[in-house]
Amino acid sequence: MRFHLLTIFPDFFTGPFSHGVVARARDAGKLEVSIHDLRNWTHDRHRTVDDRCFGGGAGMLMKPAPIFEAVESIFPGRTPRQRVVLLTPQGPLFTQSTARRYAEAEELLLICGRYEGVDERVAEHLADEELSIGDYVLSGGELAAAIVIDATARLLPGVLGNDESAVDESFEQAGLLDYPQWTRPAEFRGWAVPEVLQGGNHAEIRRWRAEAARAKTVRNRPDLLK
Ligand code: SAM
């Protein structure tokens, strides 16, 4: 799968994709990340990407023209498997099932906003969808894009190793959180690992984990059970 990032801060992404699962997957050729500098699609001396808002108000807004030109040149003859997503706090929330859906795409282009946001014509006439990573306002879409790519990349075939699995995790099993887990030592500062996990009865361990996952979901995220 190929991810594209459209940003005015291309250097921002040096860190997030150079470590762990995503870096390994890139090295193995399982995914590609192409970073596009939006200013390459400007035509003035100052490489301007923003302008004042109609109707007044504080701050600047990202102009539509460089974004339209960029997307049209990255995806000439765009197909339905080339998804274009505008990152914005005004979008529907990103969840594990959104990541699963994106993992089916051939290419995913994420538009990273800055300033007061992006001219509404990008949401209305260019992007396939708007997307928010949570109910808070970031100063730019780059962090949000890194999160979307990380969560999607680990669902791609062959990206997680044999000892890692995306199936057993939070939000995958009927909307439950993952079950709590422990590693050695069996006792740490007087806190012991539950007895059942120290035995070898796999059926009992499975039952215990299902119950523990449910209890944790009730305690921390009752909204998931609705
Ligand atoms: N004026 C906008 C509003 O209140 O809805 C906020 C603009 S924000 C300061 C600048 C950019 O950061 C946005 O265009 C978007 O790309 C990104 N951004 C901020 N919060 C985000 C979120 N929760 N999810 C996704 N992107 C976000």
Image: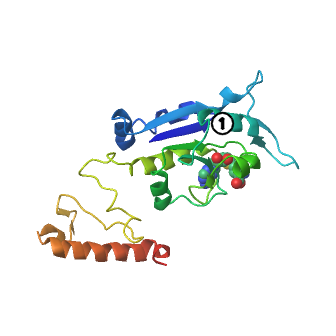
Q: Position of residue 72 (x, y in %)?
A: 65, 36
Q: Residue furthest left?
A: 200
Label 1 element class: helix
The quarter of the image holding the N terminus is top left
The quadrant where residue 145 appears: top right
Name the residue located 69 percent from the left edge and 38 percent from the top edge: 67
Please name the residue that numbered disc 1 is placed on.
72
Q: Is residue 181 above or below residue 28?
A: below
Residue 164 shown left or right of residue 69 in the figure: left
Name the residue located 69 percent from the left edge and 29 percent from the top edge: 41
Q: Amino acid at mark 1?
A: Glu
Q: Is residue 163 above or below residue 180?
A: above
Name the residue located 62 percent from the left edge and 57 percent from the top edge: 136
Badge 1 density bin: few <14, some 14–19, many ≥20, Cα 10 Å = few
Q: Residue furthest right?
A: 55
Question: In the depicted view, which residue is nearer to us: 185 or 178?
Answer: 178
Name the residue located 31 percent from the left edge and 68 percent from the top edge: 179
Question: In the depicted view, which residue is nearer to us: 51 or 31?
Answer: 31
| The residue at label 1 has a CB less than 8 Å from ligand 1 | no
